[in-house]
Image (tube, coloured by chain):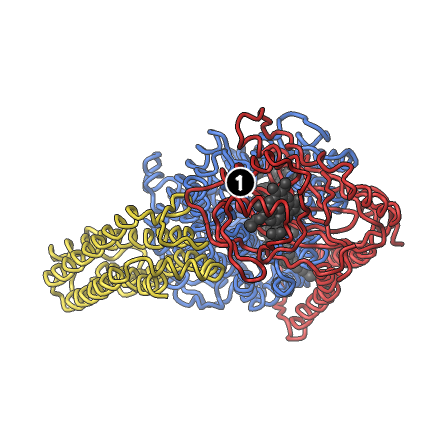
Chain colours: A yellow, B red, C blue
Amino acid sequence: MQASPLAHHFESLEKQAHAARLGMWLFLATEVLLFTALFAAYGVYRFLYPEGFAQSSRSIETWIGFVNTLVLVTSSFTVAMGLDAAVKGNGRRTALLFAASVGLALVFLGFKAIEYAHHFQEGQLPGRYYTFEGVQAPGASLYFSLYFLITGLHAIHVIIGMSALAIVGALAWRGRFTGEYHIPVELAGLYWHLVDLVWIFVFPLIYLI
Amino acid sequence: MNELMRRVLFLPEQASEYARGVDRLHFFVILTTMVAATGVFGTALYFFVRYRRRSDTDVTPHVTPRPIHEILFIGGPLTLFLVWFAIGFPQYVSLQTPPKDAMDVYVQGKKWMWKFAYPGGPSAVDTLRVPAGRPVRLLITSRDVIHSFFVPALRVKQDALPGRYTETWFDADRPGRYQIFCAEFCGIGHSSMLGEVVVMPAEEFDAWIADQRKGLTRAQDAAPAPGEPVRAASSVVDEGRRIAAEQGCLKCHSIDGSPHIGPTWLNLYLRHEKLKDGRTVVADEGYLTKSMMDPGADIVAGYQNVMPTFQGKLAPPEAAAVVEYIKSLQTAAGVSGPSEPPIYEPVKRPRQ
Amino acid sequence: MSPSSAPVSEVPAYNPRNYLNSPATGLRSWLTTRDHKRIGVMFLVATTFFFAVGGLFAMLIRIELLTPGPTIVDAMTYNRLFTLHGVVMIFLFMIPAIPSGFGNFLLPIMLGARDVAFPRLNLLSFYVYLLGATIALWGMIHGGADTGWTFYTPYSTQTVTKVVPILLGAFILGFSSILTGLNFIVTTHTLRAPGMTWTRMPLFIWSIYATSVIQILATPVLGMTLLLVAIENAFGWGIFDPARGGDPVLFQHFFWFYSHPAVYIMVLPAMAVISEVVCTFSHKNIFGYNAVAYSSLGIAFVGFFTWGHHLFTSGQSAFDAGIFGVLSMFVGIFTAIKVFNWTATLYKGSISFKTPFAYFVGFLFFLVFGGMTGIALATVSLDVHWQDTYFVVAHFHFIMVGATIMAFLAALHYWFPKITGRTYPEGWGLVGATLVILGFNFTFIPQFLLGNEGMPRRYYAYPERFWPLNVASTAGASVLAFGLVLILVYLLVSLRSGPVAGPNPWHSRGFEWFVPSPPPPENWEVTPVITHPPHDYHHAGEAPPGGVEPEPRHAS
Ligand code: HEA
Ligand code: HEA
Ligand code: CUA
Ligand SMILES: [Cu+2]
């Protein structure tokens, strides 16, 4: 990427960008499938233990989930604006907007940490560590296994996405991208939208229904 | 013909009508498979001989298929496959639907043995006795990991899943002894988890089961399994464990949370138990004792009234020890909802 | 040397400036290379190594089964042996071997491209493979696992053996194949040479493309599933643990949702190879190009809906069993289409019986027999008898060893001149092929019969009536192993001292044969323009315009 952004085996930047985009979409598809396995498990157990799942879902703090949803949606919005700035060739603006997104991601993780700490206190833990008194219906410990798996995996994705945004933002600040060449900005943005999108599914599954 | 094919294909003896039916399909399937495989192979060889290369620069005609070719390529095998399926699937369905008048036997896989329990008490390890010419339904479960109950001579196999019941049935019509294998990998003893189905003439079986019901051999099979540590009774709890095993309680009650013929004992103590008639009781010492002495009084919802009474068989200190043992089976993360009924619904029929 | 002047002459030439020696030859230049050809070769070497490891385990299994009782190892060791045999053969050898090895080497050349779309990702894929393999190997050395390659819960979550590193290894290997598949799909979409329309692509690419689709769609689910088992084994979170309300059969659904499509990951690349071999050695255009091309996609698609045929005896409802059974019948049709089209390709051809062709003939027989026993297994009631017996073992070895290994060996011989620039000894090649095909039949036909007789698989010891057939099987395996070692030896020898092959020893019209052997680092000096469908053997002569025409590369 040092000299020319065009790699030797592509005939044009356009084609290369097309390839990069296609690759990213495919990658996102595999990411979605990664979560799909967990969602499928969630669906099966919800069906087997409706009572335990409903009670457990009610026993956790909906407002944190709700705030976090707002935070993530806002961050997606700032990322989209950042991309728009990059298309217009305004690298500094992109960097600032991405920094805002990273900040929002940190807020998200902060809330998540508060929530996890709370679960640890209450004993709302997976499998054999489950000691929560409030809900004793069968399936409750499974709910928390899946809760930690899904939100944990999502949190890892938030951290990865955050790092990507930070790196790309820093490059944008240094003026690495132009109106013509800003594929990394676009890809980092796409990834972040995926992180957001997954959460849009996680939120109702875990907190609402 | 049947006998010849059976021997050529190394199939074991056919101990039921179902087995013979499956074998007929088997012969059909294998013969067509061989014909197809040698047919394709032979055609390739024929083409090779016929169109051997003459020179390195041979020019060959550009041959492309007409629609009829592809239709044949698709239609031919598809028809054949669907015919196989149309024969095989109904056989499978029949295997899944035991006749209403079948005799029930509870089968439990356990590392590494098979336990069989007949309604009304008698039980056995590794030897399943069944009457010839009468349908037998097996309600199969497992104590630990997945096993699979397999009798080649009956062409019957069914996985034994922990925490769940599966069922299968057969109607063996030839008295004899047939091997049982465990077909699902279950650890070091997998290949020695063998057993035997003994198909007895119906009258002999009736005599045998009547004998068993008299309780002649009751305690013998419930002794601790080989490998299970047999410790001297050091405390009341251990005493209770020993008695429970001796009296055969553990044939019906699990201690690991899985529903069995009776409700599990895990976290039973102080559980709010839903009864069949809608009442809820707390399983305290009194209730536990009463359940042993008069099991018919409070039937747990979802279970049948099959537990024998132990009035007069358990001395009061022994009953107390068992209660202590049940009380000891508590986990921290206990699932303390009402007992979950087993998934199967035993067929209702008059008790003999 | 430009492709138009690729010599047709009698004196074959060794291309002096090739990917093996330029830009540099040192180990470092190999380990940091981004050349898809070098990465392909590294994959081939690594996977062949693991083939030998898996084969060693197989031979130990066969020796142990030589007598009904204990023979050389104890029960625990035996259980580890077949688990590691299955894991190594499937995850470390068969899934990467053809796609990541031959696919990497050939796909860009055949497309007329300089490289794959993401060369760095390609190298990363190789290192991810090495990482996964190392972790799995570490687990094998420190105790191995005794669960079978299917890792059925709850056994796998309770065993004290080292399943966690092996599961993690398999999880990581999954990412290697995801990366490769992703790369291939993007490459096929974006780097086709001018004039290379979808219907002018070599069939090899169609099949590899279909494989990649499966890799991308199915592998993440498996990855997650294996991770769940690892977590369960290490921490007891209860997802598959019946004592905590978990459902062990759910694991089987997840596992087979991946692993059934995965069997097509293992057989589609074999079909890719065969489609090329059959055209080249019969000098004929493929009969029914479209049918063969689209049936690959058909297999990839329908293959996702048949996983339940592994669960006929685990308490599935009869309704589900029926659906999965019927769909399995349909997936067989796509294979049948291919088989018939390959056979019809020979019609009016000009067939030369070289080693790769010998493997093709073996492949046909094994695929049809193995495939049809697969359909037989899907006829539900028969499966109840055969499930988890040696019949199943024979079924999948017939396809995985019978069909795929034949294709692997065919590919090895067919492209050996292209990859190394040298030829192997044809006479020895035919001897090797004969030994392998005979030995194979001798190994696995007795296993079909053992399955009929009722011998369950994964049995360390068995009743004496199974003895004779087991001896036959072990004898066959020895012949098979001898044949394979022989092949390895003469191939290694030819690597150094084989006669120089020239660019197109088979007089093929496959696009890869229009570049010199071994190919130069940039594959095509000038970007070719494709004007004809592949394999147009009805034209006289063999040089271009056999489909490829040179065009100056765009200045960038
Ligand atoms: C490369 C690997 C591969 C391939 C391609 C296949 C292909 C198929 N397999 Fe197989 N299978 C395995 C690998 C593979 N399998 C493995 C590893 C296992 C065991 C896993 C374990 O438990 O450890 C297994 C197990 C397995 C089972 C479960 C057995 C059991 O455990 O009880 C079943 C059941 O239906 C099955 C079915 C099929 C079917 C229907 C196909 C079809 O795709 C086959 C299609 C092919 C054809 C149908 C041949 C072509 C047909 C013709 C040319 C037509 C013939 C001509 C005329 C009719 C005139 N397979
Ligand atoms: C790709 C997959 C693959 C391959 C190639 C093989 C190859 C062989 N397999 Fe097996 N096998 C499996 C996949 C495979 N297997 C799987 C998935 C299982 C199930 C495991 C389980 O139950 O969990 C199994 C199980 C299995 C069993 C059943 C064990 C049991 O259930 O108890 C047996 C028993 O005979 C067996 C035998 C063999 C033999 C004799 C070979 C022979 O074909 C091996 C021949 C190879 C060699 C002897 C190596 C020599 C090679 C070289 C020296 C390198 C040469 C290199 C070149 C020529 C390039 N295998
Ligand atoms: Cu029990 Cu295998
Ligand atoms: Cu399958």
Q: How many marks?
A: 1
Task: Chain letter for mark 1, please.
Answer: B
Quarter of the image for residue B55 reads bottom right
Name the residue carrying label 1: B326
Residue C420 x %, y %: 47, 41
Q: Which image quarter holds the C terminus of chain A?
A: bottom left
Residue A16 x %, y %: 29, 61
Ligand 4 image position (quadrant): bottom right
Residue at image coords 75%, 46%? B151
**C227 left or right of C443?**
left
Judge by depth and name the residue closer to the eye, C507 or B146: B146
Judge by depth and name the residue closer to the eye, C455 or A13: C455
**C42 left or right of C382?**
left
Which amino acid does the dot numbered 1 rest on?
A: Ile
Quarter of the image for residue B222 reads top right
Judge by depth and name the residue closer to the eye, C339 or B255: B255
**C439 left or right of A8?**
right
Residue C110 x %, y %: 45, 57
Q: Is residue A172 above or below residue B218?
A: below
Q: Is residue C151 visible?
A: no
Judge by depth and name the residue closer to the eye, B270 or C15: B270
* Element marked by disc 1: helix
Residue B202 x %, y %: 87, 50
